[in-house]
Amino acid sequence: MRQLEDWDGRSETSEIDYFHQKCVLYLALTRIAPAGELGEQVLTSYLNFLNQPAILKESRIEWMLHARELLGLLQQRKGDERAALLEALTYSKNPILQTYGRLINANIR
């Protein structure tokens, strides 16, 4: 996990390739990480990576592809894990993710 977080993509051919590769790795980790603190750490790290504005400015559609994957994780999570991810989305730095978090939260109630 630490190596993934520290990976800056300088050796990659393009920034968008690096972005896709790192998102795919984060998504794979979210699927295999055990529930609890480690699982939340992976999701938080993935969300923090998506919160970086550079890729969103460069390619909104490619950013949205991975953001939707993150949103899809909500459907797979239950109970406290789902609530934690929803809260992280709602209070993220990204206004798009915040909006999705609020809309999902409104539909739950």
Image (cartoon, helix red, strand yellow):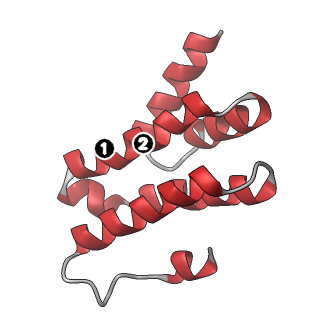
Residue appearing at x 48%, y 43% in the figure: 70
User: What's the mark number on residue 69?
Assistant: 2
Q: Amino acid at mark 2?
A: Glu
Q: Label 1: how many residues lie within 10 Å, few (<14), some (14-19) or many (20+)?
A: some
Residue 81, percent across and down? 73, 38
The quarter holding residue 87 reads top right
Image position of 79 (left or right of 48): right
Image position of 30 (left or right of 15): right
Of the numbered discs 1 and 2, the one sitting upstream in the chain is 1
Does 36 sit above or below residue 83?
Answer: below
Rendered-image quadrant of the N terminus: bottom right
The quarter holding residue 86 reads top right
Residue 57 appears in the picture as rendered: yes
**Mark 1: which secondary structure?**
helix
Q: Amino acid at mark 1?
A: Met
Residue 63, percent across and down? 30, 51
Residue 51 appears in the picture as rendered: no
Does 18 sit above or below residue 13?
Answer: above
Q: Which residue is mark 1?
A: 64
